[in-house]
Each structure stands twice: as structure tokens, then as C-alpha cells.
Image: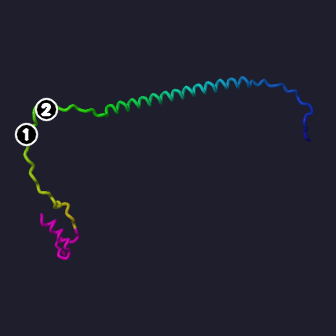
Amino acid sequence: MVLGKPLVKENTRPMNLVLHIRAEERGEFEHQVAKKMSLIEEYKMERERQQKLAEEEEIRRLRKEIVQKAQPMPYFDGPFVPRRSTKQPTKPREPKFHAPQQNKIKCCMSWDDNCSEYPSRNVLHRVFHDHS
């Protein structure tokens, strides 16, 4: 069995939708939000301006401190007379060109083996063993 469409429409009463009131409230709300946002933006801009002024003032102060000013020439009442030093002169020492005993180069072959075959070893042998 198939139900068909009713022949007569029921009377519908119009619903009381308060859309215009809701639109006014939403407009006021958005106005308040925009006002708050503009206040926040003004506050940020003011804070940035104050910070920029403080930085500029700090830079001015630092530049003022950094600038070197001329010092007055010291007054000498008499001519400069150099005096002999009371310290003893330094004693010259010979430089240490040889390596200390613990820092010698160690090799698996002894220095005396085949020294005549390798002239460079002969030189090393003289450097490390003759000055001991």
C-alpha cells in the first residue's frame, strides 16, 4: 500500500523568528571585539614606541661614554732625568736544543746498528747521544 500526498495543506502559522534582534546583538558584539582589538593594537604600538625610545636613549648614553675625551697634558716641574736601575742585569743562558731524556725517539733497532749505512741515522745518533 502506497501512501499518497495529502490533498489539503495544513495551515501553518508563521514562527516568530527574532533574527533582526539577533543581528543587532551580533553587531554590538563585533563592535566591542573590534574596539578591544584596536585597544590591544594601540597598547602594542605604544609599548614598541616606548621600547624604541629606551633603546635609542641607551645607545645615546653608550655613545657618550665611549667617546674619548682629550686628557690634559701632565705638568712636569723639572726636566726628566733618567736614573740607573737597581735591578741586576739578566744572565744569558744557552738555549736547550737537545731533547730531554724521556722524549727521545725510540726505534726497534739500536742506534749503533748500521749507523754507517744510513748517514741520517749517524747524524741523529750524534744529536741525541753526543750531548748527554
Residue 125: give x, y in percent of width and height.
Answer: 16, 69
Q: Secondary structure at mark 1?
A: loop
Which disc number belongs to residue 96? none
- Residue at image position (35%, 30%) is 61
Q: Nearer the viewer, residue 74 or 94?
A: 74
The amino acid at mark 2 is Phe
- Residue occupying the far bottom of the picture: 117
Q: Which residues are magenta?
A: 107-132
Q: Is residue 49 visible?
A: yes
Residue 39 in the figure: left or right of residue 23? left
Give the residue at mark 2.
Answer: 76
Can residue 113 be found in the magenta stretch? Answer: yes
Image point (20%, 61%), residue name: 103
Identify the secondary structure beneath mark 2. Answer: loop
- Where residue 7 appears, x then y in whole percent? 92, 33
Relative vertical location of residue 114 with respect to residue 77 in this rendering, above or below: below
Task: Give 24 or 58, whichever is nearer the viewer.
Answer: 58
Looking at the picture, how far across and down is residue 100, in whole percent? 17, 60
Q: Is residue 116 magenta?
A: yes
Q: Position of residue 46 (x, y in %)?
A: 49, 27
Residue 101 in sight here: no
Quarter containing the N terminus: top right
In primary-sequence order, the first of circles 2 and 1 is: 2
Q: Quadrant of residue 64?
A: top left
Task: Report which quarter residue 88 is drawn in.
Answer: top left
- Comparing 56 with 90, the one in front is 56
Q: Quadrant of the C terminus?
A: bottom left
Name the residue that disc number 1 marks: 83
User: Does 89 sit left or right of 74 as displayed?
Assistant: left
